Amino acid sequence: MWLQNILSFIKTFFTDRKWEKIRAVLWFCLITVFIHIIWKFWELKLHYFPVGEFMANAADFFNTLVFNESTWVITHILNIKITTAGNSIFCSNGAGLTLIGSCSGIKQIMQFAILMLVFPGPWKHKLWFIPLGMVIVHFTNVLRVVLLTIVADNWPTQIMYAHDNWLRIMFYVVIFILWLIWVEKISLNKNK
């Protein structure tokens, strides 16, 4: 009896329109986790084969871009006194951070782009929404470095906690909000 109820619920879950939004969120989560796993395998086991050199150059380019944009905001808008060396930022209290390849934001930018390519919607809107979202994800990364520098300057013992927790989650919250805008506002326009 309980197995029949479970099977009935599963059938209802995948066919009833009242579960459509929950199914969409589930697909978002599954696709995001799948992309993350595949990306990590491609990065760590295959070393970005067959485009390893291109990915290294892209990571260097985006790291430099994020570094320059972040340090500009830190020094010109927030007036925080820092020194820099290479891709490292040092606060006046001696705390610092270094932007390495994984800080480039490429993975999150590509996660967003792949997610948007997979989800249904009109291509005429994907052609502008995907690049716009990629730029937003990039500037989220800039904001992440700026916030991490603020943490380093004020609460240096919290750098790793901020980096590994709420600043990492921030990426996925932004990607989720962009996806939600796509699903709720833009992709629905094709039916109107």
Image: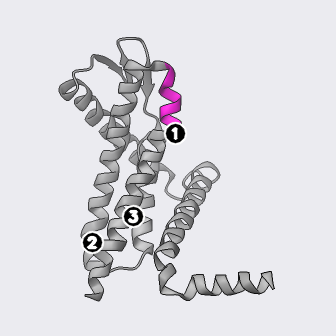
Q: Specify which label sits upstream in the sequence, 2 or 1.
A: 2
The residue furthest front is: 1
SS at mark 1 in the image: loop
Q: Is residue 75 above or below residue 115?
A: above
The answer to whether residue 6 is left or right of residue 186 is: right
SS at mark 3 in the image: helix
Q: Quadrant of residue 190?
A: bottom left
Is any atom of residue 87 visible in this view? no
Q: Main secondary structure of the magenta part?
A: helix
Give the number of the mark in front: 3 or 1: 1
User: Which residue is found at the position 49% from the left and 56% from the top?
Assistant: 51
Q: Quadrant of the C terminus?
A: bottom left
Residue 2 in picture, x, y percent from top left: 79, 81
SS at mark 2 in the image: helix
The residue furthest right is: 1
Residue 131 in picture, x, y percent from top left: 28, 62
Residue 183: image tag: none
Identify residue type, mark 3.
Ala
Residue 117 in picture, x, y percent from top left: 40, 72
Dot 2 crowding, Cα within 10 Å, few <14, some 14–19, many 20+:
few
Mark-to-mark CA distance, 2 and 1: 32 Å
Residue 127: image tag: 2
Residue 134 in picture, x, y percent from top left: 32, 57
Residue 113: image tag: 3
Q: Is residue 182 magenta?
A: no
Q: Is residue 135 above or below residue 29?
A: above
Give the number of the mark in front: 2 or 1: 1
Magenta segment boundaries in residue numbering: 157-164
Q: Quadrant of residue 135?
A: bottom left
Residue labelled with disc 1: 165
Which one is in front, 45 or 149? 149
